Amino acid sequence: MRTSVTDNQIYTMKTFLRNVATGQYFQSLEKWTPDREDAYDFGIISKAMKLARKTRIPDLELVLSLDGPALGAATPFVKFLFGLSHPRTNGRLVAGGQA
């Protein structure tokens, strides 16, 4: 997957699953690796989420990595399962979290 960054450079985004307890990245159903370079790149978030739900491994996190300098983020998978909480008033989202 390719994504554009504000400095008009194009970076490639990679999508990984990492076991928080072991620090290892998913490589295959039978193998995990400590090296991100050897890990399986899901390409898109929905593929990683589908496998994480199917395997039901506790403490997985979704790792998004851009090939640019120091770009990347990790989010515990459970936040994707249950969604992030958003303030609501009468069934509507409230901007800035204020009711």
Image (cartoon, rainbow, N blue to C red):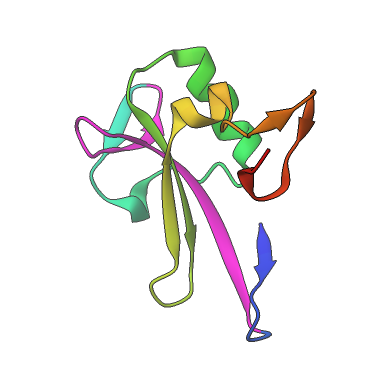
Q: How many numbered dots are placed on residues in this image?
A: 0
Q: Depth check: 40 or 58 in front?
A: 58
**Magenta region, residue range:** 9-29
Q: Depth check: 73 or 94 in front?
A: 94
Query: Measured from the top left, where is residue 44 in percent x and y?
Result: 63, 44
Residue shown at 23% from the left, 39% from the top = 23
Q: What is the magenta segment's predominant secondary structure? A: strand
The image quadrant that residue 46 belongs to is top right
Residue 87 falls left or right of residue 14: right
Q: Residue furthest front?
A: 99
The image quadrant that residue 89 belongs to is top right
Q: Is residue 79 above or below residue 3?
A: above
Q: Residue furthest left?
A: 22
The image quadrant that residue 98 belongs to is top right
Query: Measured from the top left, where is residue 84 in percent x and y?
Result: 56, 33
Residue 47 falls left or right of residue 75: right
Residue shown at 29% from the left, 33% from the top = 32
Q: Depth check: 68 or 42 in front?
A: 68
Query: Measured from the top left, where is residue 81 in percent x and y?
Result: 55, 23
Residue shown at 65% from the left, 80% from the top = 6
- Would you say residue 28 sits in the magenta stretch? yes
- Would you say residue 43 sits in the magenta stretch? no
Query: Measured from the top left, where is residue 95 in percent x and y?
Result: 72, 48
Residue 53 falls left or right of residue 99: left
Q: Depth check: 47 or 70 in front?
A: 70
In the rendered view of the protein, which quadrant contains the N terminus? bottom right
